[in-house]
Image: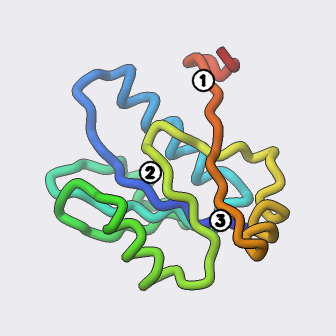
Amino acid sequence: MAALHVILQYANDSRPDRQAEYDECVRRNLANPQVALVHNLLDENVTVPQTFREHPKYREHPLGRWMTFADAFSFANAQLANEACALINLDIFLDPEANWEEAVGLLDQKLIWCGSRTEFDPAGAAA
């Protein structure tokens, strides 16, 4: 069962390697069985790949500007009340091996979670 809604803002980068990193992270979040939906609070003049737009777990919400924490929290409160949400940078993907359902259950204990980060090289190996 999918446990988390991912909130992010897609962006375009003129550096091909950086754009590839962004796209790989979005692909991994969309493929993660524990992610219910990926919500993109879209800035204007950003081109999102059609493969993302056609993905059944992708949702686009036009924002028209660079997203702030207040924007993300307002969106989550209005659209995803009582759902577990992960606000992440575009260059982050959630570990599909982690037990997110258990982590979501711990939220009832009024805990705040801060994720740690592991760097991966382009071949997918932890660096």
Q: Earlier in the sequence, mark 2 or mark 1?
A: 2
| Residue 26 against residue 83 in the figure, above or below | above
The amino acid marked with disc number 2 is Thr
Instruction: Residue at 71% x, 43% y: name it.
Output: 95
Instruction: Residue at 33% x, 70% y: name it.
Output: 61
Of circles 2 and 3, which is in front?
3
Residue 84 screen position, x and y as percent: 63, 71
* Left or right of 89, for residue 45: left
Of circles 2 and 1, which is in front?
1
For label 3, the residue is 4
The amino acid marked with disc number 3 is Leu
The CA distance from mark 2 to mark 1 is 25 Å
| Residue 43 against residue 124 in the figure, above or below | below
Instruction: Residue at 32% x, 68% y: name it.
Output: 71
- Classify the position of the N terminus by image quarter: bottom right
For label 1, the residue is 119
The amino acid marked with disc number 1 is Glu
Residue 80 screen position, x and y as percent: 52, 80
The answer to which quarter of the image holds residue 37 is bottom right
Mark 2–mark 3 CB contact (< 8 Å): no
The CA distance from mark 1 to mark 3 is 22 Å
Mark 1–mark 3 CB contact (< 8 Å): no
Q: Earlier in the sequence, mark 1 or mark 3?
A: 3
* Left or right of 46, for residue 1: right
For label 2, the residue is 51
